[in-house]
Image (cartoon, rainbow, N blue to C red):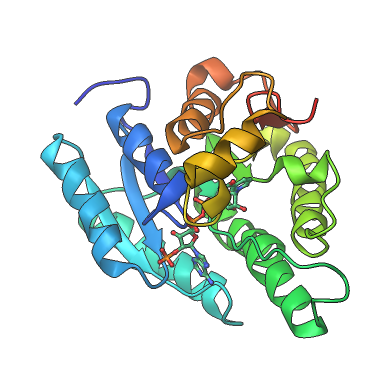
Amino acid sequence: MTGRLTGKVAVVTGASRGIGRAIALRLAADGAKVVVHYNKAEKEARDVVAAIRAGGGEAIAIAGDLAEPDTPELLAEKIVAAARADLDAPALDILVNNAGVGLRATIEEIGDTGFEEVLRIDLVAPFRLIKALAPRLNDGGRIINISSMGTRAAFADMVAYAPAKAGLEALTRALAVHFGPRSITVNAVAPGATATDLNPGARDPIRAQAVATSIALGRVGQPDDIAAVVSFLASDDGRWVTGQTIDASGGQRL
Ligand SMILES: NC(=O)c1ccc[n+]([C@@H]2O[C@H](COP(=O)([O-])OP(=O)(O)OC[C@H]3O[C@@H](n4cnc5c(N)ncnc54)[C@H](OP(=O)(O)O)[C@@H]3O)[C@@H](O)[C@H]2O)c1
């Protein structure tokens, strides 16, 4: 299979379902070998791997619960070992930190534990995974963090989620400066309402229609819409973009 990512090796966290699944399939269609990370949805992750292989690509599935304290470093070790053994890849090129939880709760509804868990999965885990995998990333590589348009527009029930994603965007800018000398670009992609398990409202036809009234392009997003932006950033065409948060919301709440 040849495409704009032929010869590249990508890791996509949370690639069993939703946006991560679409990113894994898209990067593979572009020619990358893909490490498909998942937490609980083993069958779905194996289905993604099978779909990539059926299309002539190469992929492996690796599990890891990013809510657990030791997972990011252990996962990084497993990824490096499996990429070498099963994908014949001594190093990595693209890391997409997509896995996330989207707990919707107001300040009265959320406790310390819930707040900290969202931060652990949506901010601390990407930080630790980047730190552990950066030495294994080829110069000229890509780090792409999936944020949310909830950092730009205020939602009262995103009191943990929005701060976690805002931190991820700040981390993105700091790391873009740090990794610039290695020609590694670091960017965030900020989806708006996208039809996945995390956003059941965007899946429900009636509720999605209501949400669409706040979106310039008049519909909610589909996972493929986000994967297309990630594909661009991952490709050579994205080489001059770094430290940015690219809104991929169809113009939600402009
Ligand atoms: N959907 C939206 O409207 C929307 C909007 C803005 C931003 N986003 C962001 O887009 C990203 C993907 O979201 P999505 O909508 O595709 O969600 P999703 O369909 O719920 O999928 C979430 C993915 O993250 C993984 N994950 C969840 N908790 C995990 C944990 N503790 N450890 C490791 N992996 C874990 C899941 O693994 P398992 O399947 O194995 O459980 C799954 O692969 C997230 O970062 C989210 O914040 C989504």
The outermost residue toward the front is 206
Horizontal side of 240 relative to 62 (left or right) equals right
Quadrant location of the C terminus in the rendered image:
top right
In the picture, residue 219 is in which quadrant?
top right
Q: Is residue 175 above or below residue 79?
A: above
Horizontal relation, residue 230 to residue 31: left or right: right
Residue 29 spot, x, y in % from top left: 28, 30
Q: Identify the residue shown where x is 70% and y is 40%.
A: 179
- Describe residue 14's horizontal placement relative to residue 56 as left or right: right
Quarter of the image where one finds residue 2 = top left
- Give the quarter of the figure containing the N terminus: top left
Q: In front: 14, or 157?
A: 157
Q: Is residue 183 visible?
A: no
Quick one: 71 or 177, which is closer to the camera?
A: 71
Measuring from the top left, give residue 103's x and y in whole percent: 67, 66
Q: Quadrant of residue 9?
A: top left
Residue ID at (40%, 60%): 37
Where does the image place residue 227, in percent across and percent down from the top left?
Answer: 47, 33
